[in-house]
Image (cartoon, rainbow, N blue to C red):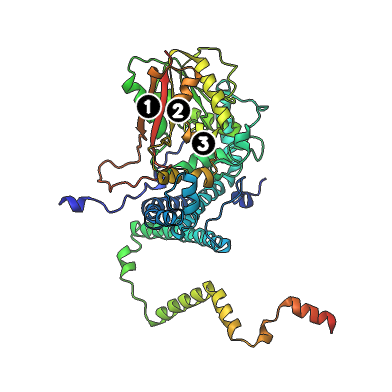
Amino acid sequence: MINDILLSSNKAKGKRPYFLEDKTVERVLNITMAVAGELAVMHERLDTIERLLEKKNILQRSEIESFIPNSEEAEERQRWHATYIARVLRTVQQELEALQQDPSHNRSMEEIAEELGRI
Amino acid sequence: MDAKSQTPAVNLPPVYSLIARHEVFPEVSHDETARYNFLANLNRHLATYISPGNKIAFDKRVQPNFVAEHGRDFQTRDEVKEAMKQDPHYQSWAALRRSTMEMRQQGGRSMTLRQAEDLAKKVANLNAKSPETLILDPNLKTPYYLSIMDNHCMPGSYHTELFEGDVSNAANYDSGLFVTSGGMLGKYTDGGGKAIASWVLSNAPDFKPKRILDIGCGIGHNTLPLATAFPDAEVIGLDTGGPMLKYGHARAVALGIKNVKFMQINAENLSMFENESFDWVQTTMFLHETSSKAMVNIGNEIFRILKPNGLSLHIEQPQYTAEMPLYEQFIRDWDAFYNNEPFWGAMHDVDMNDWMISTGFKRENLLQFGARSINDNEDHTKPKAPEVEDHGRSAIWNVFGAWKK
């Protein structure tokens, strides 16, 4: 048996070029594009489901377009969006927290390790 | 309807579900299809909207800045390359293009690797039906120019077998050409082979080849159209990649094409073939994957094995000439450095006429013409928006060749 998961993402032989001035930004771009691809895959899957449901007369796609949530549903959905966005932008939030915190909240583990080894 | 409303604003690539499934074609799930659809659209978007911005950036700032700094214009495409590397628009495009190519490999390989054992079995079963038309040489050394890096950033390239009989990369190659070319090569990605067969039938109606050699045939996608166009001929596809040949042979058996044989041979040494033993020797998008010395050896072998009044043709992207602007040379050369096709630039600098004459052809018997993919994916019933040429990728080729007279 082969490890198809790991092998699928193998590097090709030859040095990988980077084009952006900051390699770390390009790394993030590559990850972001992969996620964008998976969102497109999910969208296409949902589109398939909608079309199949329509063909089976379970719902009409126009019902999706005209769907208006009631207040409870609306709140649940808005809460989903809020949670989702906060999850995605976690790193920005944490950097802002660090900016606002007392320096004692932001000591490096190297510094703390040195201190704990001493006291 | 007026003319304006008939003109579409967007040319969409064909959906992946149009691809032809033969018996050894990998099973493609719903999401794998969707992943390829995304990538084909991303490639189309980059080619249509983002890539032309490179020329705009070049004209508006890269070239003027260079002239202002150096007091002269660019003299080489390497100077253009170095200057473009500093441009933010180019950087974004290049980073995205590289990213799409890696995603295409990941998408295809995740699909074929998960079914690698099934693919190997299917191929072995089909190959067992016609063992005499697949001649492998397990001792053949992969040429240095193919082992020094992985062509097209396909991890493992053409020669790696993860286990005995593994053809996962060959299946990946077969599955993905549709995506990188935006379907321009047709349902069987054989638009190049069809174009060349059609040219020969139309332009040399009296030419009745009995023996045809296709060098660097890979999975035989461009070899099979030669076999179907010339059913009385014996067609031999030759390559160094064992897994490609195993898959390609099984693919030919699955498609019911019988007058083709696949052989694992390095084209630099065709000593197993006698002098003047082929009517037609073909290479299709192959020479740029060799090296300078290899091209000399291959050229000499082609001339030697060609019969008098025989034909040799080579399909490649347009050669770089002194008339081609340096910017165009630079952008056409991109895949050489960034899609692991490192001989691309040097090969496109070669004067093909000189190369063919050096092997023995006479100048008055040389040929050169343009060819376009014969593409059964195009919907001829709908109008098309003007196409933007995806330099170095478009299925529009130059063909070089000669009659041996």
Q: Which mark is residue B346?
A: 3
Q: Which residue is mark 1?
A: B368
Q: Are marks 3 and 1 in contact (CB under 8 Å)?
A: no
To which chain does the residue with label 1 belong? Answer: B
Q: Are marks 1 and 2 in contact (CB under 8 Å)?
A: yes
Q: Amino acid at mark 3?
A: Ala
Q: Which amino acid, mark 1?
A: Gln
User: Marks 1 and 2, Cα distance to the nearest angstrom?
Assistant: 10 Å
What chain is tagged by disc 3? B
Q: Determine whether B296 is above or below B190 in the image.
A: above
Residue B351 sits in which quadrant?
A: top left
Determine the residue positioned at 58% across, 47% down: B114
- Tell me if mark 3 has few (under 14), some (14-19) or many (20+) residues whose alpha carbon lies within 10 angstroms of its own: some
Amino acid at dot 2: Met
Q: Which mark is residue B352?
A: 2
Q: Residues within 10 Å of mark 1 (few under 14, many from 20)?
A: some
Q: Residue at x 34, y 75 (%)?
A: A68
Residue B158 marker: none
